[in-house]
Amino acid sequence: MRLMKKYILLPLVALFLFVANATAQIEFPEDKVSWKFSIEQDGCNATIIAKITCVEHWHVYAANLPPEAFSLPTEVEPEQSSNYTVVGKVLEPKPEFYHDDAADEDIYQHSNSFTLKRKIKISSKKDFTLKGRFSFQTCDETHCLPPFDTGFELKVKGCEDEEVTEEAGGKAIENSFESVNGDEAKGKDGAEYVRFEESWVRVPEGNSVKFYKKYLSLGGSGNE
C-alpha cells in the first residue's frame, strides 16, 4: 500500500515542479517596461507626456523609424476626436543607434528612462477625456517579447479660441535671416536654421544642417 502511494505521489510532485518552473520562466512585456502618462496644457495647446522606464538590459524601439525598418515603433496614438487636433509626430530624445550586421538593419532604440511627447491643439470649450493607445515591443540582447498594446486616458480642460499669432512671429524671425533656401536659412549673425513643423529651428552649434535635419526627421525635439 505504501509503495502504491509512493508511485502515485512521485508523478504528482514532478508535475507540480514542472508547472512551477514553466510559470517562473514566462516573461511579460509589462514586467520589463513601465509607463506613466500625464498632460501639460497652456490654453488651447497641450502636450501628452509619456514617461517610460525599461528594466536593465531591456529596450524598446524608437517612435520614428526609417521607412525601411523592420522593427516595431513605440507608439503614442491619441484617438481621433472633434475635441482636438494632433500636431506633428511623436517627439522623442535622440535614440541609441547601432547597425545589426546579422539582419543588415540600422537599429534605433531607447533604454533606461526616457520621455515621449505628443502635441495636440484643443478645439473644445468643454472639459473632456482624451483616450489613446500606447504600444511597444521590448527586447534584450537575446530575444524579443510579443508586441504589447494598452490604452490610456487623460483629463483635459476645454479652452476658448485663441487669436493666431504664429504667422507674425514667423515673419519676425525671417526678417533676421541673411538668406533663405527652401527649408534652410542663415542668420545675419552666421547661425543656421532649418524649417521644422512650420517653425524655424536654430541648428545647435557643432551640428551640421544635414545631420540636424535627419535628427528632427527621426522625431528629435527642436526645443532641446
Image: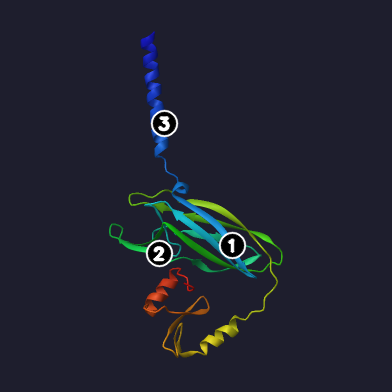
- Closest to the observer, 71 or 207: 207
In this rendering, position of residue 57 left or right of residue 179: left
> Which marked residue is nearer to the observer: mark 3 or mark 2?
2
Q: Name the residue under label 3.
A: 19
Q: Which one is in front in this view, the residue at disc 1 or the one at disc 3?
A: 1
Q: Which residue is drawn at 42% across and 85% down?
A: 191
Q: Which of pointers 2 and 1 indicates the residue nearer the eye? A: 1
Percent position of residue 91, x then y: 49, 67
Say whether residue 124 is left or right of residue 153.
right
Looking at the picture, how far across and down is residue 109, in whole percent? 39, 60
Crowding around mark 3 (Cα neighbors within 10 Å: few <14, some 14 to 19, many 20+) is few
2 or 1: tag closer to the N-terminus? 1
- Give the amino acid at mark 1: Ile
Q: How far apart are the two marked residues, 2 and 1, measured between alpha carbons?
A: 23 Å
Please state which of residues 49 and 27 is positioned toward the viewer in this rendering. Answer: 49
Which of the 4 image quarters holds residue 192? bottom left
Identify the secondary structure beneath mark 1.
Answer: strand
> What is the CA distance from the residue labelled 3 to the residue labelled 2?
40 Å
Q: Mark 1 points at which residue?
A: 39
Kindly indicate whether the residue at mark 3 contacts the one at mark 1 (C-beta within 8 angstroms): no
Q: Mark 2 points at which residue?
A: 95
Quick check: marks 3 and 2 in contact, CB under 8 Å?
no
Where 133 falls versus 20 (above or below)?
below
| Amino acid at the residue labelled 2 | Pro
Q: Report helix, strand or loop for mark 2.
A: loop
